[in-house]
Amino acid sequence: MTTATSTSLLAAAVAALTFGAAAAAPPPQALIATPVDTRTGPGAYYDAGVKLLRGAPVKVTERRGAWVKAEVEPQRAAWIPAYALDSEQQSSQAGAVLRRVSKGLLRNLTSLLDQRDRPKYLSRSAVTLGIRGFSSAYAVERGGKAGEVDPALWEAAAFDAAAYQAFVAERFKGRDWESFKRRLPLDPAAPVADPDADRIGGALTAFVARQDGLVRNAPVEMYLSQVATLVAESSHAYDLPVRVYILDSAQPKGFVSPNGIVFVSQGALAKMQSEAEFAFFVGHEIAHIAFQHGLRKIQTDARVRENDAFAEMEGDLKWDERTDDKYVRTNAELTEMADQIHEYFARENNDRDELEADYWGLIYAARAGYVPEAAESLLLRMVADGKPGDGALLWNGVARSKRLDGCRRGFGQITLDRKELRSFDGEFAIGKKKAAGT
């Protein structure tokens, strides 16, 4: 990188940090603050492209809602979630900018100097190889076999964007989705997504799927994924590329992996009677990911810099053969984080996190146009009364009375006119008939 280019990048960092709070829209020049996948369109349901690395300079050319079109280099532009820009993260509150500017400026300038000879992005194939590598290694460490990992669960191309848009248009015929989101804002904000979500998520996806096995039904998976995507787009985790799979279990189970893979058991689906109930179920699970429940953040500046460097060599790794210190440390951290997330959801969860997930599940469902009161009927059917249950990924880890009380308080905070909201019972019944093969 030339001296002139380095000077230009440093100037862009200073400008973004200094003036970001005053800008209503992202500035033309910005830096990537969080590693993020690019998309071919303004939504997580579009195909994924390269992964932009922290510190990469981009030129913002367009904004649509929470997505921006960013030019990585001449003739290469793609869509990314706006939160990935340093200017967005620094401009959330003007006062917070002033308190953080010195530390943030130093970190970004240091990052630029450290990364001046590094690539701006990783190819999709390199990202895929890294995810496969860690997923296989994790499976072996947890008593499985590398060959048992089915990468198609998380590597499949995004589902048909046109079909999803048609689904949304049908659901909002005569209604205004954007109006719902404006009138029911997400306050407070959730933490920024963890950059290791894809690697950890791939490992957990394979691990959870192997425990119970899956009931594969492509039409039902697509239908449920469309509902779940609508809820995710209405949530803090709007950039989560959601896909739904059905666990072969009669128990009421649910789990969302950090990479957006949703698992719902046959037992849970059997107790649901409407899209609104499923929307609350999915919203609850997405809230766990959005607020990083169960994940102790191991996020120091040193780890960030190390993982930046590690990401660049990710595609070349042979995970079962690496012995260098950087690989061993990073692999250990990823394994610890994956274990932590799974163990958290596999035991009786604490009341605070479950009730918080219930609350945001209501908000997300309502923002997606669904009647939030459907949560009450689902809880009455799916969660056993009396003593809390236990066991992996079960939905009865907190006493039903507490959850019902929490939801009833939440209903009062949702000011949308219930006449504007829907439950779509008939559509869900048709979906369940497909699942039963009738």
Image (cartoon, rainbow, N blue to C red):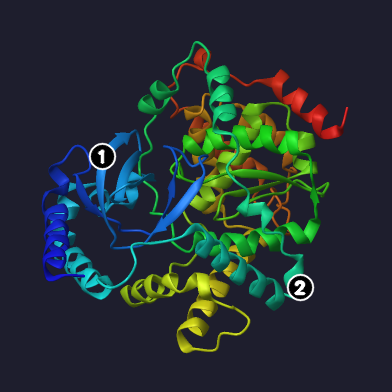
- Foreground residue among 318 and 213: 318
User: Which element type, helix, strand or loop, lies under badge 1?
Assistant: strand
> Would residue 355 be found to the left or right of residue 414 on screen?
right
Residue at mark 2 to residue at mark 1: CA–CA distance: 46 Å
Q: Nearer the viewer, residue 22 or 254?
A: 22
Whether 157 is drawn above or below 128: the answer is above
- Residue 345 appearing in the image: yes
Label 2 crowd (10 A; few <14 / some 14-19 / many >=20)? few
The label number, if any, that marks residue 145 in the structure image: 2
* Residues at marks 2 and 1 touching, judged by CB atoms closer than 8 Å: no
Where's residue 75, x and y in %? Answer: 32, 47
State the image quarter where residue 176 is shown: top left
Q: Quadrant of the C terminus?
A: top right
Residue 156 is left or right of residue 330, and the answer is: right
Q: Please state the horizontal and vertical placement of residue 391, each as a whole percent of the image.
A: 74, 59
Q: Looking at the image, is mark 2 or mark 1 earlier in the sequence?
A: 1
State the residue at coordinates (33%, 41%): 69
Q: How many marks?
A: 2
- Determine whether 391 is above or below 386 in the image: below
Q: Which mark is residue 61?
A: 1
**Front-most of residues 288 and 164:** 164
